[in-house]
Every structure is written in structure tokens, then in C-alpha cells.
Image: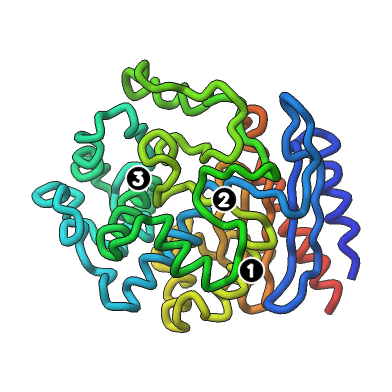
Amino acid sequence: MSFETLHKFLTDCTTKEKIPGCVCWIGNDKDTLFFQEYGYAQIVPDKIRMSRYTIFDLASITKPVGTAMAIMQLTERKKIKLGDKIKKFLPDFKNKPNGEKTIHELLTHTSGIPAWFPIYILSEEKRMDYLAKTNTGKSKVIYSCLGYIILGKIVEVVSGYSLDKYCTTYIFKKTGVKTTRFGNITKKNIAATEFGNKHEKNMALKYGKASKIKWRDYVIKGEVHDGNAFYSYKGVSGNAGLFSNARDLAKIMRHYLDEEIVKPGTLKMMIKDHTGAKEKRGLGWIIDPYPELLAHTTFYHTGFTGTMCLAEPKSNLIIILLTNAIHPKVRLGIMPEIRRKVVKLTSKILRSRG
């Protein structure tokens, strides 16, 4: 089986400067079928070549691989029920609109809680109040980073561990991975993201004064790029903050699909469609993202920094694509086409195998 077409495509992506660099891992529960690095982990101020083992800011892949898995483990231990309301765990939510929202609604992005707000422009005392009272009033799928920040807080209250310690103890140590953890990361072999925080700053200024924020004015590397995770929660948040490399992320997915992180029934529940909407949502995952290319059992998640983690249990397929697409500046709209092409080429190659 030849991955030459995929190799050429990813080479072109980096040599023609669509993205600075990437690492792509493709395999199944036992075998690695393709594992290759391309381009540069950093291009400013100095050029540093990409390695297969470069560590990336996973961004929103934190949601399923960290937060949702943690929540579901706590349901298995009967510490949480999916129908439980937020107010049961977080006192600040009592007698507030979002206190009535459930764990299930948070996991599936159907709570009506807004997608985003720069909560770091508020004082620490007002942040939880904002999360407790602000709602769009809609019950459809609204992808919400704020909802997963709340889930991260619930993990901490219920388990008695900080979110990073919980994930390390009950998820990552189980799988034997070495690089997967919340930032800050001090190792050298790390992919850079944005030079400064211009994109975040421009978004935050639309919501009010952000003059008190000490915006980063250097190449962000080993620090979470996401502003809420960095400025509000020191890099440990339910919506973002995890770092890993392709090999480790593939290993986590193998253990997950082998039902070694959560039980069989829990796994089945997490990767099925709970919303029936155009954008199908499982518990932490996006379901059936490429219906014309892969089976409907496919689930995946992406990250703003340029990351993707995909699995298709029916054909025993895992695809990990990690890029530093927002280095040295954020350019929106680049990754959907690249991800789709990687999936399309992989699907074609595997079908040709018979």
C-alpha cells in the first residue's frame, strides 16, 4: 500500500507555505501505516525543523481527550449523572439560568451557553457569575468553549483533583504516554503557534476594555494559545490546554477504542450521535464529519491551532494530523480543506488495498 499521494500533498502544503509544518500519523489498533513529519516546527525568529515527535498545542482536542473522558469516567464511578444540573456541583450557579443546564447539554454543546467570551477581561470574582447567567436561549448545537470550561470545573469539584492532575492520573498514566500533559511545556521540541496574541486581542476588544491584559508579544511556544485557558486559568482549562505529539495521541486513541480508558458502554455512548443535527454531536466528539468519505461511525475533533484527531471504529482507522497552521500569524479558513484532503486521500488509499 503506497501513501505516495498523501506524502506529495503534505509536502506541497509545507513547501508551498500553506502551513509551516505538520506531522501525520495513520494506523489502527495494532499497526502504524504512515508516520511522517514535514516542514518546520518554527519559522520565526529562527527556523527549526519539524520532528515526528514534535509536541503540539492540541487546542480544542482537549475537550474530548481530556475533559469529556474525565466526566465520563466520573459517571462510571457514579459521581455524576448525565442528567445532573450544573447547580448541583457549582454553588455559583444556583438561582442562575445556567444552573438548570445539565451535564449532557454541556457535553453535546446544546446548553445555549455562548460559544465564546473573553472572561479574562472580567475580575476573577465576576467570571463564574458570567458563566452562570449568560445564555443565548437556544437549544440547538452551539459549539461552546465556555461550556467546556464549566465541565472542567465540575471535574475538579467532583474528583477533588485539579483538572490537569486528574487527567494525568486517570487517563494519561493509564496509556503510558510520555508527552501528553497540560502546559506550560519547557521542552525544546515544541511547535510554535502565533507570534504574539494579535488575533485574541482583536476579538477581546469587541467585548470591552482589555487594557489591563498583559498581551503576549513573543512567539507562543509551550504556552497554551487559547486566551481564556492562558489568561484566566494558567493553562489548565476544560476547553484547551493539552499538549501532545502524534505518537502519544495515537496511543491514547488506541487505548480509548480498546475500552481501556472508559468501559464499552461508555465508549458506545460517547461516539454516537446525540443531537441529530446537521452538525452531529456525541459526548465530546463530532460525529460523522465526512459522510461521503468515511463510514457514519467516524468521530473526530479539531483544534484552532491546526490539529485533528479522527477515528473510524468500523474499519479500525485512526488519523492524527497535527499542524502549526497559526504560526507565525492566524490565518482563518486554511485547515478545513487540508483536513478533508488528508481524509480523502487516506480513504482512497485504504480502499485500493481492498
Which residue, given by chain and number where applicable, does mark 2 sit on? 243
User: Dividing the image into 4 quarters, which one contains the N terminus?
Assistant: bottom right
Asked which secondary structure carries label 1, the reply is: helix
Q: In the drawing, does residue 165 fall left or right of residue 291?
A: left
Could you say which is closer to the camera, residue 316 or residue 55?
A: 55
Quadrant including the C terminus: bottom right
Identify the residue at horizontal 52%, vertical 51% (top origin).
Answer: 242
Q: How far apart are marks 3 and 2 (CA)?
A: 20 Å
Judged from this view, the residue extending furthest toward the left is 95
User: Is the Cβ of the residue at disc 3 closer than 8 Å to that at disc 2?
Assistant: no
Q: Which SS class for mark 3?
A: helix
The residue depicted at 80 percent of the width and 71 percent of the height is 350
Give the residue type that dot 2 points to. Phe
Pointer 3: what residue?
Answer: 146
Task: Give the numbered dot on residue 251.
Answer: 1
- Cα distance, mark 1 to mark 2? 14 Å
Q: In the rendered image, which quarter is residue 325 located in?
A: top right
Q: Which of marks 1 and 2 is nearer the N terminus?
A: 2
The type of residue carrying mark 3 is Leu
Q: Kindly identify the amino acid type of the residue bearing the numbered disc 1.
A: Lys
Which of labels 3 and 1 is toward the front?
1
Q: How many residues crowd mark 2 within 10 Å: few (<14), some (14–19), many (20+)? A: many
Q: In which quarter of the image is residue 162?
A: bottom left
